[in-house]
Amino acid sequence: MPILEVKDLKTYFHTRNGIVRAVDGVSFSVSRGETLGIVGESGSGKSVSCYSLLGLIPQPPGRIEGGQAMLDGEVDLLSASEKTLQGVRGKKISMIFQDPMTSLNPYLRVSTQLVEALRIHEDLTKKESLDRAIKSLEEVGITEASTRIQFYPHEFSGGMRQRVMIAMAMITHPELLIADEPTTALDVTVQAQILELIRERQKANNSAVILITHDLGVVAGMCDRINVMYAGKIVESGTADDIFKNAQHPYTVALQRSIPSLGSKGKPLYTIPGLPPDLSRPIPGDAFALREGITSGGKWDNTPPPLRQVSDTHWVRESDVILPPLEEVLDG
Amino acid sequence: MSVKANLSPSEKRLPEATVDLDAIEAGTSLWQDAWHRLKKNHLALISFWVLIFMGVFCFIGPFLSPYDYRSNDLEKTLLSPSLQHPFGTDDLGRDQLTRVMVGGRVSLGVGIIATTVSLLIGITYGASAAYIGGKVDAAMMRVVDVLYALPFTIFVILLMTIFERSIVLLFIVIGAVEWLTMARIVRGQVLSLKKQEFVEAAVSLGYSTRRIILRHIIPNVLGVVVVYATLTVPAVMLLESFLSFLGLGVQPPMPSWGSLIKLGADNIQLFPYLLIIPALFFSLTLFSLNFLGDGLRDALDPKSSKD
Amino acid sequence: MLKFILRRIAQSVLVIFVIITVTFFMVRFAPGDPFSAERKMPEHIKQRLMEHYGLDQPLMVQYGNYLGQLLKGDLGPSFTETRSVNQILKASFPVSLELGGWALLIALCIGLPVGITAAVFRNTFADYFPMAMAMIGICLPTFVLGPILALVFGVWLGWFNVSGWFIPADRVLPALTIGLVYAAFIARITRGGMLEILSQDFIRTAKAKGVPFIRIIVLHTLKGGLLPVISFLGPALAGIISGSFVVETIFQIPGMGREFVSSAFDRDYTLVLGTVILYAVLITAANLLVDIVQVILNPRLRFEDS
C-alpha cells in the first residue's frame, strides 16, 4: 500500500491579478522504498503540489481548493489540523530544499538544528539526542562529526550544508522524504554525491522519496517512476523506462531533446519555443498546444485533454502537438 | 511557418507570462513597476497630496494673506481663532495664519535645502568610495565611521550657540549631519550593484562602462536615494525645529514651525491653539513625508515587508 | 574576537579625544568670553580674571594644561558659578542619567512587545493600529508631546506636577515624553527586523520540521530579528540625550542637559567641555557595547575579522 496517495489536488493562489491555478487536478502516489520523480519547468506546479501536502503554502493568498492526500491510508493531509500536520512534518514526512545556503538558520548551531526535530517528535534526553545527531552527521559523510556539530552553518561549504539538511531530514527516520531541487544550487561534481547520498539513506530507512526537479538528467539515474508536469497538470506518468524509452507526450519528448548532452557537439541546442502560460487565466484545453511557437492539430485547444493509458504503468495526457524538428527550431 | 486551425486570434493564443527584455535592459521597468505599486498604496498617495497642499499653503499662501508675518498689533494680542484671524494672533498681535504659512516656508525650505546638501555630499562621497573600491574605499568609510560616532546634535548646538546665527550656517550644519547616512547607503547600493549578476551580464555583453553606469547603475541607485531623501527631510525638519525650540534656529521675527511651537508650549495653559495649530501642521507634514517615503521604499523594493 | 574588542576600544578612545579637541577649540574660537555676557566689566578687572583663570595664555598652552588636568580627573572651575565643574556635574549627571534610564526602559518595554506582535500578526489590526500609533510617535517631537502631556495630565487631570524633580511621580511625565517617541522607533524597527527574518528560507525549513509556531518565533526568529534594534540602541541613546535637553527645559529638571545648553550660551568654556566630555564618553561607551553585543549575537560577524 502506498505511503502517500494524492487524488485530484488543486491549489490556487488568489492574487490581485487573478486566480493562479498553480496545481490543477494532480494525482499521484508513492510507496516505501520507491523514488518518484516530478519533473517540469518553473511554474509547472511541481513544488507547490508537495508544499501543499505539508501545509507549507501561505494560506492567504494560497488555498487548497480540493483533493485528498492520504498518508499511510490514515490521515488526509489536506484536511488535517495544524496540530496534526505539525506531528507529521519532520517525523513522517521530511523535506529538503533547494538552497542550502539559505535553508539553515545562520544564528543557530548545527547541533541545535539537528537535535530540534528529535526534541519535538521523540522523547529523548539531551545526551541521547546529541549522540543521535552526531551519528546522523556521520551517516551523511561528515567527518569529525562530534566537533563539527557545534559549528554554525556558514562554516560549512554548500555541499556539506546540503548533507546537513539531509541528516536533519532523515534523523527521525521519516517514511517519506521530499527533495525539492536538492542539487540545483550545487556544483556538478557535488550533485552526484548528494543524489547518491539520498539514495543510500533511502535504502537504509526504506523511505519513499519524491524528487522534484527540472533536470531530466537528475531524474534518469535516480527515479523508479516519473511524473512530468506542465501548467499545473501531469502530462505523463510512468516508470523510468517508459518515460525515457517510450515518451508519448510531446512535452516529454521536447524535454528530452533539450538535454544538452544528447545533442551532437557543435550543433546549436534544442529549445522549446515560447514561454510557460500565465496561470492566472483559465486554460481551456491543452496548455502545451496553446504555447507560442508550438503547432498542434487543434483538437484539444478548447477541451481539457483526458488521460490515456499506454500500459499498466504508463499514462499520458492526450495531445496532438507536433514538435518542430530539430533543424527548424534553430531558425526561429 | 505555422498553420493553425480556424480559431479567432483571441482564443488561439494563451496569454503568456511576458517578459519585456528591452525594459529590463534599460532598467526603466523598475520605475513603471514602482509607480504602479505606489499608486495602489492609498496612504502614500494621500500623503503625496497633503504635501502638495502644504507646499502651496506655505509658499503661495503668504502672498494671499492680507497680513504680514511681522506686523505687530499690540491691541490685538493673543486672540482666539476668529473669522478675521482664523488661527488667532500671538503675543505680539501677529496673525498666526500668516505666521504658520511663513513658518512652513522656513521649515520646509530648510528641510529640502539641507537634504539636498547632504544628498550631494553623500552621493558623491559614497559613490566614489564604492566605485574606486579597495583601500581608498576602506579609508573613506573609516572616516565615516569615526564621524558617525560623534554626537552631532551636541556639535550642532555648540555651533549654533557659538557662531552668528545665520540661516546658511543652519543649512550647512544640518546637512553636514545627515550626509553620513546617505553616503553609507549609496556606497552600499553601488557595491551590491557592482556585484550583481546583471552588471556582469552587461559587461560580458560588451557594453561600455558609460552605458552600464547610465542605464543600469544610476536608475537603481536613484531609487534608494529618492527613498532616503524623502525620509531625511522630516529628520532635518525635526532637527531644525529642535534648534528653534532651544532658541538656536532662525531668529525672530522670522518664524519657523519650531519656534511657533515653542511659543505655543510656553502658553499652553491659557492659549492652547498657539501650540496645537503649528504642531498639527508640523506633525502632518512629517507624517506625510514618512508615509510617502515608506511607500516609495515598498514600491521600489519588490520584496517589501507588506506582503 | 578579542582583537576586535581591543580595536574598538582604541577607536573609542580616539573618538573621545577628537571630540575633546574639537570642542575645546570650537568654543575658544567663538566670539565673546565668559565674562562679557553678564554685565559690562571694567577692562582691568576682566584682565585680572583672565589671568586668574589662565585665559590669557596661548591657546595651545591652555590646551595642554587642560589635558593635563583632565587626566587627573579635574574638569576645572566653572566661569559662571562658584562651584567647580566636577561639582556641578556630580549633582546634575545622576538626574539626567535617571531620566534617560527610565526613558530607555519605557521605550524598550513598550516598543519590543509591540513590534514583535505586529510582525507575528502582520496585516491585521494588531499590526496596523500599533504601527499607526508608532508613526504618530515618530512625527510628534518631544517638545510637542511634552507640553501636551503636561497640559493633559498635569494641569487638567492634576495627576502629576508639571515641573520639578522631587517626588518619584515627577519622573513619569518627562520619561514618558522621551520614552514614547523612542518606543515608536523601536516598535517599527523590531517589526521590520522580525519580518525580515520571518521571510527567510530557514523559517520555512523549521516549519517543515514540525517546529511549533511559538518556538519558531522565540528560538529561530528573535535572535536575528532583534539585531536591528540592538544596533539602533547606539543612536537611540544619543537621541535620548538630546531629547533630555528639551525635556529638562520644559519640565524644569535640574539635569545636565540644561547645564549644557546654558553653558554654551554663556561661553562657560569649562562647563561646556565638561558636559560634552561626559556625553561623549557615554555615547562612545554605549556604541562600543552595542557593537560587542551585535558580534556576540550574530555568529556570522565573528569570523570576519579581516
Image: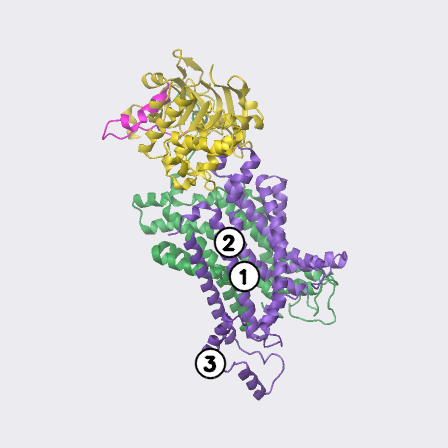
Image vertical order of residue C35 relative to residue B189, above or below = below
Res C58 label? 3
In terms of depth relative to the viewer, which is nearer, A206 or A286?
A206
Q: In the rendered view of the protein, which quadrant contains the N terminus of chain B?
A: top left
Judging from the image, mark 1 belongs to the subunit labelled C
Q: Amino acid at mark 3?
A: Pro
Q: Amino acid at mark 2?
A: Val
In primary-sequence order, the first of circles 2 and 3 is: 3
- Identify which residue is drawn at 48% across, 65% down: C16
**Colour of the chain lettered C:** purple
- Identify which residue is drawn at 29% across, 45% down: B206
Instruction: Please name the residue that numbered disc 1 is placed on.
Output: C282
Q: Is residue B62 visible?
A: no
Classify residue A196 by image quadrant.
Answer: top left
Judging from the image, mark 2 belongs to the subunit labelled C
Q: Amino acid at mark 1?
A: Leu
> Where does residue B199 sit, x and y in percent of width and height?
35, 45
Res C290 label? 2
Image vertical order of residue C86 relative to residue A322, above or below = below
**Colour of the chain lettered A:** yellow
Residue C257 in the figure: left or right of residue B35: right
> Where does residue C235 sit, x and y in percent of width and height?
53, 56
Res C99 label? none
**Colour of the chain lettered B:** green
Residue C306 in the figure: left or right of residue C79: left
